[in-house]
Amino acid sequence: MGQEQRISLVVEDDAELRRLMTTLLEESEFNIIECESAEAALATMLLRGQDVSMIFADIRLSGVMDGIDLAREVKMRWPHLMVVLTSGNAGEYPERLPPGVVYMPKPWNAVSILAAAQHAISSAGVR
């Protein structure tokens, strides 16, 4: 396996949900880095951004930044990165999402998550 490392960041402040998201994404070819805040995810991106193919983040995060702030920041710096935001209560969110960000309501459909991961993997080489 001489291919470059593919990393997905899972950003969720609830440890149990983060574990579930990680378990689902482990079915794909990703190595997972778990982050409990948008700030931690951004710090990870600054260090490892070129290795990251996808961010899967909850919209509601404890900390100064929420998932939408994270998506906006990431899309500005890494426009080709796939960003998937999720929420169990999204009423007002979808129209606030930055362009190019995928929205996935909770409860998730494992097939949709794996399809998104597959898409991120296949488009990762197209930078």
Image (tube, grey):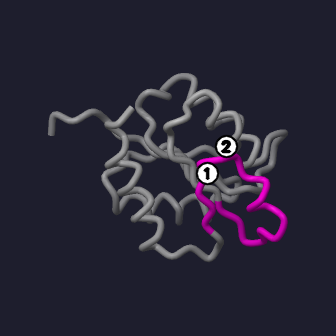
Number of the label disc, if any, that sits on residue 85: none
Task: Give the residue type that dot 2 points to.
Answer: Ala
Q: Which residue is drawn at 55% across and 34% down?
A: 79
Which residue matches tag 2? 71
Which residue matches tag 1? 101
Q: Give the range drawn in magenta.
A: 86-104
Q: Which of marks 2 and 1 is nearer the N terminus?
A: 2
Q: Position of residue 47 (x, y in %)?
A: 53, 22
Q: Position of residue 80 (x, y in %)?
A: 49, 37
Instruction: Calculate the distance from the C-alpha at mark 2 to the C-alpha at mark 1.
Output: 7 Å
* SS of the residue under disc 1: strand
Q: Position of residue 20 (x, y in %)?
A: 53, 66
In which quadrant will I find the C terminus? top left
Instruction: Note whether 49 is above or below 115 in the view shown.
Output: above
Residue 16: in sight, yes or no? no
Contact, CB < 8 Å: mark 2 with mark 1? Answer: yes
